[in-house]
Image: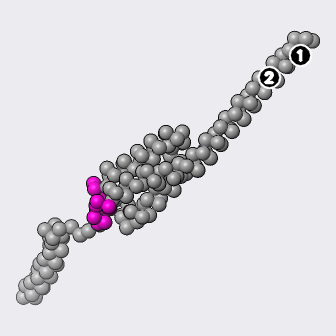
Amino acid sequence: GLLVIWRETVLICEICIYIYFFLYLAVNLSVLTTACSSHYGNVIEEFCLAKFKLDMEVLDQRQWCSWEDTVESYGELTNCTFLVALKMNCFWPNRMVDEFFIRVHRHYFHDCSMSGRLLHDPPNRILGPFIVVPILVTLLMTALVVWRSKRSEGIV
């Protein structure tokens, strides 16, 4: 009888410890995420975005869609958001980072193609043959058909 009561008491204590541990984690994580969300967005806006803005102002606006010209600044912006999250004990990536980068893309990269490269016509030395060759082949085939039709009239 006493052994059964002792086991039930130990089991109840273990359950209480697990519940306490779960509640402790839940409270700390909720405090952590609310603390993160209240200040993290401000810090990345003021610290990370400020540097990115300066880097982008150096570039001509036509270069914003050139991945070769923006990859370094964009990488620094990404690393900055990660390091700030790390220092503030925030998860990364998180909802605030996603919203932050959506705003950055809407402002700086809204006119860019999906590939990240500016769309433009190829140089004339490449484009010219693709235009001239089909025209010449069409004219040559037309001349060949006319020549063969005149030649076959006399053979009949």
The residue at the point 92 percent across, 12 percent down is 1
**Spot occupied by residue 87 in the image (x, y as percentages of width and height):** 49, 39
Gap between marks 2 and 1 measured at Cα: 12 Å
**Which label's residue is closer to the chain start, 2 or 1?**
1
Which of the labelled discs sits on residue 13, or is there none? Answer: 2
Q: Is residue 90 visible?
A: yes
Residue 67 lies in the magenta-colored region: yes
Magenta segment includes 49: no
Q: Amino acid at mark 2?
A: Cys
Name the residue carrying label 1. 5
Is 83 left or right of 113, judged from the image as shown?
Answer: right
Residue toward you, 95 or 122: 95
Q: Nearer the viewer, mark 2 or mark 1?
A: 2
Q: Position of residue 112 (x, y in %)?
A: 36, 64
Q: Residues within 10 Å of mark 2 (few under 14, many from 20)?
A: few
Q: Is residue 137 visible?
A: no
Please state, as top left, top right, bottom left or bottom right, where the C terminus lies in the image: bottom left
Residue 63, picture quadrant: bottom left
Q: Is residue 62 left or right of residue 9?
A: left
Report x, y in % for residue 123: 17, 68
Q: Quadrant of residue 59?
A: bottom left
* Amino acid tagged 1: Ile
- Magenta residue span: 57-69
Kindly identify the residue that appears in the image at 45 percent across and 53 percent down.
46
Q: Main secondary structure of the magenta part?
A: helix
